[in-house]
Image: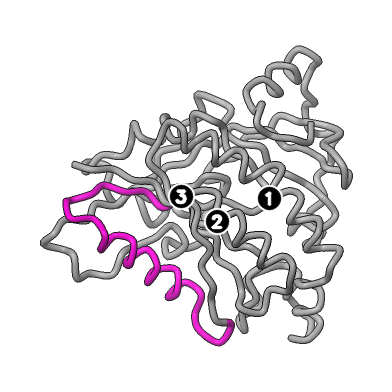
Amino acid sequence: MNTHIYFMIRYSVYTRNQGWWQIGKNVSSDKYRNTLFSESRLLLHEKLFFDVTLPSLKEISSTSKITALIFISEELPEPFKSNLLNAEADYAWLEVVTTKSDKALNTQIDRKVEEKLRQNEEDVCYATVRLDDDDALAPDFGVELTKYLKPEFSGMGVTFPKGIFAVYDGNQYRSFYHYKKANNAQGLALICTRTQALAGESPLTVFGAGNHTSIDDRYPTVNDSSKIMFIRSEHEGSDLIASGRLRDKTKMKELSGLEYEELRQRFRSVKIF
């Protein structure tokens, strides 16, 4: 059976259901949109995407069959939209998908995955993987996930809770901390199987599986903590800070010098160490 990994990235997507993101809560629609599309915020997220997220996906693509779907708003300002489209032209596995703000985002995501699945002429076991536009996954992420990319794991979640929490100062990462959290969002995957007999059914994606913190209440979920599998970025434009959830670093364990060098080697594609 064929296998495939679909990475799902919501890139500053504007939706009428603004409560999905912290910057849209308890503010007017105009305030939410202006904040989302402010030049300073978009410049920050663009730098992190091109220096952190995209290079990590490129590494993964060298060992695994992947498609990275970048969901953007039709309202995304220039030159940010064109810069993403230029990247799409450089990588066969990268696709920019324009969404409409007055339509349900998850429905549009499901339809795009359905479109991609219809291109398979054979049965396929696939994973949809959640990834933010400012985080990095380990170069062997695809290899590790493929261990669970089997029909017997269909309908199950897979997550890799062990990673690194990195503080970004606008130019580079300046501090690194050990981070481990069950059912974490970074690289959260949902395994499904599509057979030709089920070709007409709507696909289930990782976003359709509901809140990541409680995914194991709805789906059997594997939490594999055997390796460091991601870098989670904290920066002035992150949802963490927007929600007032600034981490108390005194309660976190910082990486030693040796651990830092090992991290740099493992995530050698990331450009802002």
Q: Amino acid at mark 3?
A: Ala
Instruction: Please name the residue that numbered disc 3 is placed on.
Output: 92
Residue 205 falls left or right of residue 3: right
**199 in the magenta segment:** no
> What residue is at 62 percent from the left and 58 percent from the top?
86
Residue 46: x percent and y percent?
Answer: 73, 55
Q: Give the camera-side residue of 100 and 96.
A: 96
Q: Amino acid at mark 2?
A: Glu
> What residue is at 80 percent from the left and 55 percent from the top?
44
| Label drawn at residue 212 | none
> What residue is at 78 percent from the left and 86 percent from the top?
30
Q: Secondary structure at mark 3?
A: loop
**Quadrant of the frame with the N terminus:** top left
Q: Secondary structure at mark 2?
A: helix
Residue 96: x percent and y percent?
Answer: 53, 63
**121 in the magenta segment:** yes
Q: Is the image coloured rainbow, by chain, by secondary structure, or in one colour? A: one colour
Which of pointers 1 and 3 indicates the residue nearer the eye?
Answer: 3
Instruction: Please name the residue that numbered disc 1 is placed on.
Output: 49
Q: Label 1 crowding class (10 Å Cα cut-off): few <14, some 14-19, many 20+?
A: many
Mark found first going from the N terminus, 2 or 1: 1
| Label drawn at residue 88 | 2
Residue 64: x percent and y percent?
Answer: 40, 36
Residue segment shown in magenta: 101-129
Q: CA distance from mark 2 to mark 1?
A: 13 Å
Residue 216: in sight, yes or no? no
Residue 178 picture quarter: top right
Q: Amino acid at mark 1?
A: Phe
Q: CA distance from mark 1 to mark 3?
A: 17 Å
